[in-house]
Image (cartoon, rainbow, N blue to C red):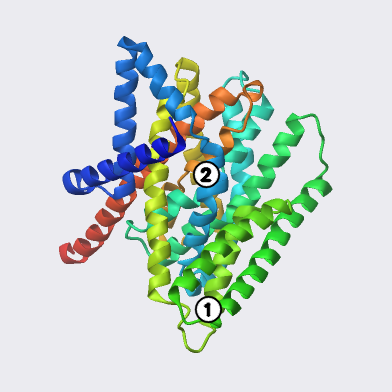
Amino acid sequence: MSTLQIVSLIVAIAALFGWISTRLLRLPLTIGTMLLTVGASLILLDVGRFVPAFHTWASNLVQQIDFQSLVLNGMLPLLLFAGAFLLDLEQLWRERLPVSILAIVGTVLSFFAVAALMRLLSFGRASWIECLLFGALISPTDPIAVLEMLRRARISKAIESQLAGESLFNDGIGAVLFLTMIQIAAGHQPTAGHIAWLLLLQAGGAIVLGIAAAWLTSRLMCMVQSYQVDILLTLSLAFGGYLLALLGHLSGPLEAVIAGIALRHFNRLKPSGRIADDRVDEFWTLIDEVQNSLLFVLLGLEVLVVAFNPTTLRAGLAAILSVNAVRLAVVALCALLVRICRRERRSAIFTLTWGGLRGGLSIALALSIPPSLGGHWIFAATYLVVVFSILVQGGSLHLLMSRKQQSRKTTPAAA
């Protein structure tokens, strides 16, 4: 099939399943579309057992989609920029300490703990480097999935800012860890100083570039009175800044996040407030929601190319248990460090644990791992973690939080 045919098919699936999800199932758009796509893909797999040619055709169709490149070089810049640009900056600043600890300390601790637990649960069948690669790609929470979930969940502004901020900022740490593990697997032995320099270069350079590009964009936006031009300038910032970061061997995801936050900050400093136009916000909200729907359809279609067998299913189950157990332990430790578990926030640990979703970014990284380094089981395990994370955790968090709020309202009356 041609590129136009594939794109048309994906958009049509997203539109149809989105309508069914909203009109008939009464589910959130992205959750419903992914659930229906996974269900349809499983039906295709079942039909493929009786008609192998049909399964081969469907699998080849999905394999024509370069998921890794599409996510990392297409969707990610826009989604990260949109998520950062639409953040509540004042609330994020108030929660800067827990966000920093969760994004840095939490990600590093999760990396080592998940790797060790996967090594233990595999009874030594998975090598240390395979487990470390898996720990590096699965430890950062996915900003795309987290931000989409936060739009539905009724949680406190403080916890919302912590989850959103952590997911946006921990990608840089995760990328350095993943790159380091890839270098070790290739036979290189980077020193601690080299890793620190790599982190400083990628993160520091991305921060400087993001702020500078956002400042220039804000200045240009001040010189015109057109929201259409404002939108084009923000689009060029999202794509252009990300591209410059990649060309300069900097962290593209971190640059996109910093650019979005910095542009919002610079725009708020303008006395007229014209740049922070509602139509620009509405545009980026629309970009965010439409791309999320398309991404979740693509995630559902990936079922057709996952090599499911007893080994990968066991790896997936072990990964789900490991990731959530480690997340609970790490969040609890970080809660003690920043004392976020005060009396009025006793549900913080549960919310931060259950709300730490994984998504398309982890799958894109898993696809880059060759079979010689456990690519097959890592991809299958990552996919199962992502499906569980989005459908079960993301789909239930707002229901659980609603029940908690109702119980709090009824408790005083009962007393």
Quadrant location of the N terminus in the rendered image: top left
Image: 69 above or below 228: above
Q: CA distance from mark 1 to mark 2?
A: 28 Å
Q: How many discs appear?
A: 2
SS at badge 1: helix
Q: Residue at x 69, y 64 (%)?
A: 209
Task: Specify the amino acid type for callout 2.
Answer: Val
- Identified at 32% across, 56% down, the residue is 152
Q: Name the residue type under label 1.
A: Asn
Q: Can residue 36 be seen by looking at this rendering?
A: yes
Residue extending furthest toward the bottom:
271
Viewer-proximal residue, 411 or 115?
115
From where the camera sits, is residue 138 visible? no
| Residue under pointer 1 | 267
The mark nearer the N terminus, 1 or 2, is: 2
Q: Position of residue 287 (x, y in %)?
A: 41, 57
Quadrant of the rendering where the C terminus is positioned = bottom left
Looking at the image, which residue is at 37% across and 67% down?
A: 282
- Percent across and percent down for residue 332 are 51, 51
Secondary element at image label 2: helix
Query: Residue 71 shows which numbered tag?
Result: 2
The answer to which image quadrant residue 348 occupies is bottom left
224 to the left or right of 188? left
Given contact means CB atoms under 8 Å apart, are the residues at marks 1 and 2 in contact?
no
**Whole-percent x, y for residue 141 in the image:** 51, 48
